[in-house]
Amino acid sequence: MRTEQKSTYRVAVYPGSFDPVTMGHMDIITRASKQFDLLIVAVLNNLSKNPLFSLEERKDLLRKVTSHLPNIEVDGFRDLLANYVREKEAQVIVRGIRSVTDFEYELTMASTNHKLNPDAETIFMMTNPKYSYLSSSLVKEIAHFNGDTTDLVSPEVDAALRKKFNEKAGL
Ligand code: PNS
C-alpha cells in the first residue's frame, strides 16, 4: 500500500560556465527540468576566467534556447555555489557527466559543496552518449576555424558564434 507523501516544491540548480551552451547542456537541462518543479540554470561569472561570451550574452543565449521549457529560470552568480544554492532554497545541484574523466573533478566538487552546504545534494546525470565528446571549448575551437557547429549547438548559439568570431576577425 502506498503511503501518503508530503508534497514539497523541488528546486534544483544546474550550474556551469555555459560559454556557450551546447547540445550536451541542452540534453541535461531538458531531462533535469522533468525531474524538478523549478530548474535554475546558474551561469558562473568567474572573473578569473576569460570567457568568449559575457555573462549577459551567455544568459541571453540560455534564455533563448530554453524558452520552450516552462520551469526554467536563468540566473548568474559570482558567489560560492554552496551559498547560492542555500540562498535559492534549492535542495539539489545537477551536474552532467560525460565520461570517467569528468568523474574525478565532479567528485571533488560535489564533496566540497557537501562540506559547505550539507543540505544540498549533488545529483549526476549521464550525458546522452551522442554528446559524450562535446564541450564548449571544442565548439569554440571549431567555430574559430569556421567549421560546422550546426549539430553541436542550437541555431541561436551557432549564429552568435559566427557573429562573435566575425567581429574578432574585423569582418
Ligand atoms: O561548466 P563548468 O566550468 O564545469 O562549471 C564549474 C562551476 C561553475 C559549476 C564551478 O566552477 C563552481 O561552482 N564555481 C563557483 C565557485 C565555487 O563554489 N567553488 C567551490 C566548488 S568546487
Image: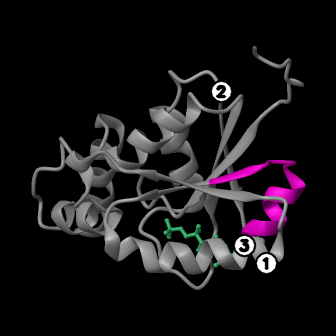
Give the residue pinned by disc 3: 113
Distance Cα–Cα, label 1 vs label 2: 29 Å
Distance Cα–Cα, label 3 vs label 2: 24 Å
Q: Nearer the viewer, mark 1 or mark 2?
A: 1
Q: Toward the viewer: 17 or 85?
A: 85
Which residue sits at x=76%, y=16%?
A: 2
Q: Is residue 20 magenta?
A: no
- Upstream in sequence: badge 3 or badge 2: 2
Q: Does 64 sit left or right of 134 as displayed? A: right
**Residue 71 numbered mark, or none:** 2
Give the residue pinned by disc 1: 115
Mark 1 residue type: Lys
Say if disc 3 is inside 8 Å of ligand 1: yes
Ligand 1 resides in the quarter of the picture at bottom right
Which residue sits at x=22%, y=61%?
A: 133
Height in image: 145 above or below 15?
below
Say if disc 2 is inside 8 Å of ligand 1: no
**Residue 135 numbered mark, or none:** none
Mark 2 residue type: Asn
Q: Does 24 sit left or right of 47 as displayed? A: left
Picture coordinates of residue 155 (x, y %)?
29, 35
Q: Is residue 86 magenta?
A: yes
Which quarter of the figure is the C terminus placed in?
bottom left
Height in image: 128 above or below 139?
above
Q: Nearer the viewer, mark 3 or mark 2?
A: 3
Residue range (magenta): 80-93
Q: Are marks 1 and 3 in contact (CB under 8 Å)?
A: yes
Q: Toward the viewer: 83 or 20?
A: 83
- Upstream in sequence: badge 1 or badge 2: 2
* Residue 170 visible here: no
Classify mark 2: helix, strand or loop: loop
Mark 3 residue type: Asn
